[in-house]
Image (cartoon, rainbow, N blue to C red):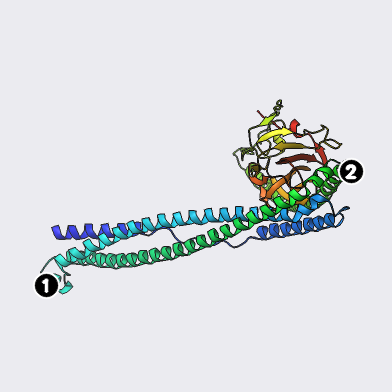
Amino acid sequence: MHLRHLLFLLALSLTTSLHAAKEAPARANKPATPELAEKQADLGELRQRIDHLRKELSSNEESRDAAGDRLRESERRISSLQRELHDLAEQRNQIQARLKVLEQQSKELGSTLQQQQGQLEKLLYKHYLRGTPDSLQLMLNGNDPNQVARDLHYLSMIAHSRADLVEQVSATLERKKALATDAKERSAELADVEAEQQKRHAELQKQRQERQALYAQISEKVKNQKKTIGSLQQDEKRMSQLIDRLSKIIAAQAAQAAKAAEAARAAEAARAAEAARLAAARQKERENRPEKPVDREPTRPTVIAEAPKTRTPEAENQHLPSAGDGAFLRQRGSMRLPVRGTVSGRFGSPRDGGGTWRGLFIKAGNGSEVKAVANGRVVFADWMRGFGNLLIVDHGDAYLSIYGNNDSLLKQVGQSVRAGDTVATVGNTGGNPESGLYFELRHQGQPIDPMKWASLK
């Protein structure tokens, strides 16, 4: 009786352990959806339109011998190298994170393998001590035939458990081998990324030295041109032309989206009408019954928007946008400016050389991070005379935010951004003698005072 009880417990324990060892099925890659393909097509069309616009504006430049234009290619190249280094850094972080996951999985598999090997060792040892009873021998011993059948069943369960356990050990060893191969490949990939980073760093340093030497040669000419009213007016005219044409492109894209949304609403209305017809039929059936139908139609809560608070600005900005800021329209009076620094050249104040500021100039150290002030999509990212490396974000409802004189642009046309995302780094491109960010807000193509939206407290 003691032997039979022991055999039953051993079989039950091994079966439970084997079921617990089977886990973590492989993840299947999801195929691209039609919606994703449509979005990619829209993105390609947007980039094609804006690239055509950029080339058209460049071909219409009046004075190609402007001193600032001699810096154009150098500053474009510096921005491109900075973006590549930024992307390489993100890629490097992803590979390192993957290596950590692989290391953790390897440790977990090692622990599982140790447990499986321990179970197999105990099972083999018990079989060695007791041997493998022969079914004929059990029959000739004169024991109860029913008990013999049960003993044979328990022994069969143990034999199957042993075979499954051996299979599990083999599978675990294969997974460890696959993990080791994956880790080796990721390590090689990491080495390639780090080598590419070093190459880009060296090229960036060379480009910076060339730009510095070039700027030293033409700095006086750049300063003189920046002080002329005609130069400022031409820069502002180019900016207005760019905004007007971008607005048309954005409106065309919005019209296409609205048309698709209208078709979706029509389909939804048809489905709602069919659902209403079916509901009416069910209601009529319920009315013919003695029970009174219960109206369960939900009511929608009324959302009351809280009026934003207007705050008095200060000369120094010490705060940055964060991911929680989100939608543009909810930020009037509380918006965070995109970079820390001293706010100067305020909207409507006189500019050196004549004219007035249409935005803000925020003095900041070269290389400081420039943050997106709200959720949106990049609709322009290129060099422009008078504004250097320029980035424009569309926030919807005909609102744009503009970031100029950047050292580098880290986002490209079509990319979505969230409030608080780093979109550029501070510089003095476009012939600007002082390091800082030129920041504008526009609504329906017209500049608006950022300080009426922003809070520096």
- Tell me the number on the disc at residue 267: none
Find numbered disc 1 in the image and state the secondary structure of the residue it sits on.
Answer: helix
At x 71% / y 25%, what residue is drawn?
Answer: 312
Residue type marked 1: Leu
Which residue is disc 1 drawn over?
140
Instruction: Give the answer, above or below, for where 302 lies relative to 225.
Output: above
Q: Is residue 149 left or right of residue 192?
A: left
Find the residue positioned furthest to the left.
Answer: 141
**Whole-percent x, y for residue 13 in the image:** 26, 57
**Residue 228 percent across, percent down from the top left:** 87, 41
In the image, residue 248 above or below residue 315: below
**Helix, strand or loop under label 2:** helix
Q: Could you tell me which residue is drawn at 41 percent across and 54 percent down?
A: 104
Label 1, residues with CA under 10 Å away: few <14, some 14-19, many ≥20: few
Residue 230 appears in the figure = yes
Do labels 2 and 1 touch, CB within 8 Å? no
Residue receiving disc 2: 230
The residue nearer to you, when weighing 374 against 241, is 241
N-term-proximal mark, 2 vs 1: 1
* Marks 2 and 1, how far apart at CA: 116 Å
89 or 326, which lies in front? 89
Identity of the residue drawn at 60% across and 39% down: 290
